[in-house]
Amino acid sequence: MFQQIFAILSSVIGAAVVVGVAGAIVGEALRFISRRVTNPRIAWLCGNLSLGEGFGLGLLAASFIVAGAYVAASGGGAEYGYAWLRYLVGAAVAFAAYGIVASRRSA
């Protein structure tokens, strides 16, 4: 029973680390692009993203990308829905950890 609990926890923590790093990279790329948008038709959508907004959107995008890479690497042995759900839970844990760290830093 404890081995199953530890297996689930390690899966969630591993997914949080993978999606957190990938989300940070994608989020920083989105922030880089959003700071260079000058067209007013597009600027209302993604103009000048903050650090939290960029990280959140990066986590969302990375959960799809990492799940697709996981399914492709498994040779089709894994289902995309299960992989996406796993990495989405990891993204939620990573965003919660970011919120805790950001709130302590500003206090």
Image (cartoon, helix red, strand yellow):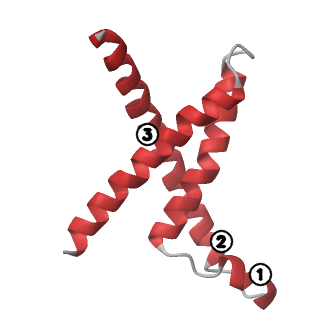
* Position above or below: 28 against 72: below
Instruction: Give the residue drawn at x 63%, y 27%.
Output: 82
Q: Which residue is outermost to the left?
A: 107
Q: Quadrant of residue 41?
A: bottom right
Label 3 vs 2, first from the N-terminus: 3
Q: Where is mark 1, residue-wise? A: 42
- In percent of width and height, residue 68 lies at 70, 33
Q: What is the C-alpha distance between the residues marked 1 and 2?
A: 11 Å
Left or right of 32, for residue 107: left
- Residue 77, image x, y percentages: 70, 13
Disc 3 is placed on an element classified as: helix
**Residue farthest along the bottom direction in this orientation:** 40
Q: Which residue is mark 2?
A: 33
Element type where label 1 sits in the image: helix
Please report contact status of discs 3 and 1: CB closer than 8 Å, yes or no.
Answer: no
Q: Are marks 1 and 2 in contact (CB under 8 Å)?
A: no
| Left/right of residue 57 with respect to residue 106 in the rendered view | right
CA distance for labels 3 and 2 = 25 Å
Residue at the (64%, 75%) spot, across then down: 34
For the residue marked with disc 1, what is the amino acid? Ile
Q: Amino acid at mark 3?
A: Ala
Question: The disc labelled 2 sits on which kind of residue?
Answer: Ile
Image quadrant of residue 26? bottom right
- The residue depicted at 67 percent of the width and 18 percent of the height is 78
Q: Any mark on residue 16, and which? A: 3
**Disc 3 versus disc 1: distance between alpha carbons?**
31 Å
- Viewer-side residue, 95 vs 31: 95
Neighbour tally class for label 2: few under 14, some 14-19, many 20 plus, Cα within 10 Å: some
Q: Position of residue 66 (x, y in %)?
A: 61, 37
Looking at the rendered image, the quarter that the N terminus falls into is top left
